[in-house]
Amino acid sequence: MEKARKALSELTDALQGGVGVWTEMVNPDDGSWLGNMPQGLTHLAHVNLLETLVLTHETVQPQ
């Protein structure tokens, strides 16, 4: 769970460096963003991860 939260945080932080969207590719040598803006599947995956983390947190730690 903590690994997923860290990955989510890093991805979300990456949005702050541009226009608020991810590009299609990342240069494996230096981590720079390459290519065109995505169609939306990347953002959908981000939202799905957020939902999964929330649901998992609620299941593990009932309110």
Image: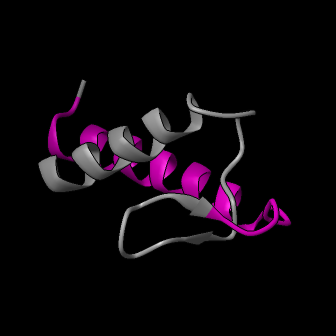
Query: Where's residue 10, x and y in %?
Result: 35, 43
Q: Is the magenta stretch mostly helix, strand or loop?
A: helix
Quadrant (top left, top right, bottom left, bottom right) of the C terminus: top left
User: Which residue sits furthest front?
Assistant: 30
* Camera-side residue of 8 and 53: 8
Question: Residue, x 75% and y 33% (percent of image)?
Answer: 19
Question: Residue, x 49% and y 40% (percent of image)?
Answer: 14
Question: Residue, x 29% and y 38% (percent of image)?
Answer: 58
Query: Where's residue 26, x and y in %?
Result: 52, 69
Look at the picture and state if 10 lies above or below 33.
Answer: above
Look at the picture and state if 50 lies above or below 49.
Answer: above
Does the stretch in magenta take in 26? no
Does the stretch in magenta take in 54? yes
Where are the magenta residues, as a range?
34-62
Left or right of 38 on screen, residue 55: left
Left or right of 48 on screen, residue 12: left
